[in-house]
Image: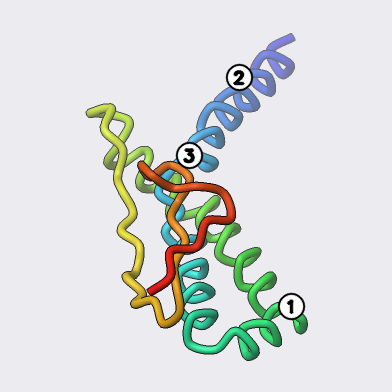
Amino acid sequence: MRKTFATLALASMAAISMTSCTAGPHQLGRSVDDWDQKSYVASPRINGVLHFFPIMILAQFIAGAGDFFVTDAYTFWMHDVWDDKGTAFEHHAVTATDGSMKSLLNEGSGWLKVDKK
């Protein structure tokens, strides 16, 4: 009975602590996303090659694992959970060469709407 209780308590603690790993600023993953956007604006053809040979996909996967196990857990437990204020991620600014799309969360944006330069 004691062993079962200890196992259950340990599993509960692990489950509670791991939920923080899915919440956070996702710094590594969003940095890869910024790299993806920057390389697409610079050259859509080269960016397409980086997706055809799954370099970007592999980079996103590795970054997601790093965020899950380190970045998000650290940020959640060391900074955000105690004051209930989340840490923001500032995206890399990219200068549009042809046009731009806005986040669907932005005012005045629209799905598939391209603002020409």
* 71 on left or right of 36: left
Residue at mark 2? 9
Give the image location of residue 4, x and y in percent.
Answer: 73, 16
Q: CA distance from mark 3 to mark 2?
A: 23 Å
Residue type, numbered disc 3 = Ala
Which residue lies most toward the front here?
A: 116
Q: Residue at x 38, y 48 (%)?
A: 74
Is label 2 in a helix, a strand or a loop?
A: helix
Image quadrant occupied by the C terminus: bottom left
Mark 1 or 2: in front is 1
Q: Residue at x 68, y 72 (%)?
A: 58
Q: CA distance from mark 1 to mark 3?
A: 26 Å
Is label 3 in a helix, a strand or a loop?
A: loop
Give the image location of residue 34, x and y in percent.
Answer: 45, 69
Residue type, numbered disc 1 = Pro
Give the image location of residue 19, x and y in percent.
Answer: 54, 33
Give the image location of residue 40, x and y in percent.
Answer: 54, 80
Q: Residue at x 27, y 41 (%)?
A: 79
Image quadrant occupied by the N terminus: top right
Relative height, residue 18 to residue 87 (above, below)? above
Mark 1 or 3: in front is 1
Q: Give the quadrant of residue 11.
A: top right
Q: CA distance from mark 1 to mark 2?
A: 41 Å
Q: Give the quadrant of residue 6.
A: top right
Relative height, residue 82 to residue 99 (above, below)? above
Q: Residue at x 28, y 27 (%)?
A: 84
* 75 on left or right of 48: left
Label annotation for residue 54:
1
Residue at mark 3? 23
